[in-house]
Every structure is written in C-alpha cells, then in structure tokens.
Amino acid sequence: MRYLILKHYQGGPGHPGMDYTPMDQWQPDEVDAHMQYMSDFAHRLQETGEFVDSQALSGEGAFVRFDGEGRPPVTDGPFAETKDLIAGWMIIDVESWDRALELAGELSAAPGAGGEPIAEWLEVRPFLTAAPGKFVDAD
C-alpha cells in the first residue's frame, strides 16, 4: 500500500507550531547533514523496495483558483500559504500502516540546527485505492 509522508513544519496535534530554527538560518554543514540524512533514508528504502518518490519544495509559489471566465486570481495571502506549510514529501510503498508510521518516525529524526533531530510532525496519509462513493452498475 502506498502512503504519502508530508513534511510541513507547522506542528501537529496539540502543538500549534514547531520550535525549530528555519533551515535558511542553519549553518552550511547542518544543511548538508540534513540533506545527507534524507538521501541515506531514501537510498535505504530503495534497497528494500519501499521507496517510490520524494521531493523537496521551493519556498516560491502562489495560490490559484478558478473564479469564472478571465484570469484566475493568484495571491500570496492573507491566509497561510502552501509554500509556508509544505516543505516536501515522500511516497512509500509498504506492507502496513504500522510500517508507514515506523518510517515516518525515522524521517522525523532528521538532524537540524546544532545536529539535533528536528522531531517534526509528519502527516502520513494512505493513497486512495478506489473512487469514494463509486456506484456499481447493477446491470
């Protein structure tokens, strides 16, 4: 079963925000250590066949929506921006929910400023395997 592990640095249940130093304030060797941890983690999952894909996201972007004919509105606020919430993601293909949680726990330990684990909250969501509310034709 495939799962999305979403990295968003915005806290988790009962924790409104992360208490961490933003990556743009880390020392170059701290960024390198973090990126190496992420790379090693993905490589290990490639070896076990559990890795599907991962991407880090740029801080640039905008919200866009359809608003009738003409140019769609594009905005940078005043609401929270996806670029401020989502730092990246990983897709894994594992045998169980428990394995997905185990791997997310390991990923949460990636080092940050001072070499300490970030201990970030990660969102783990299963891929939808069938369309919700899909009707079966009785004929």
Image (tube, helix red, strand yellow):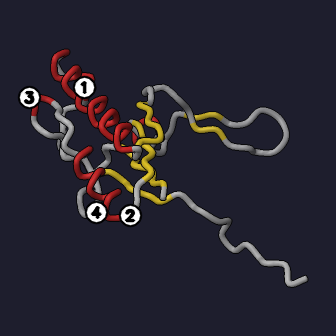
- Give, as a three-letter code, the residue at label 2: Ser
Name which of mark 2 and mark 1 comes first in the sequence: 1
In the rendering, which numbered label is found on residue 114? 3
Name which of mark 4 and mark 1 comes first in the sequence: 4
CA separation in Å, label 4 and label 1: 28 Å
Image quadrant in which the C terminus is located:
bottom right
Residue hosting label 4:
13
Left or right? Give the position of 30 relative to 135.
left
Identify the secondary structure beneath mark 4.
loop
Q: Residues within 10 Å of mark 4 (few under 14, many from 20)?
A: few
Identify the secondary structure beneath mark 3.
helix
Residue hosting label 2:
96
Give the quarter of the image for residue 91: top left
Left or right? Give the position of 9 relative to 135.
left
Give the quarter of the image for residue 57: top left
Q: Residue furthest top?
A: 28
Give the quarter of the image for residue 98: bottom left
CA separation in Å, label 2 and label 4: 23 Å
Q: Residues within 10 Å of mark 2 (few under 14, many from 20)?
A: few
- Give, as a three-letter code, the residue at label 4: Pro
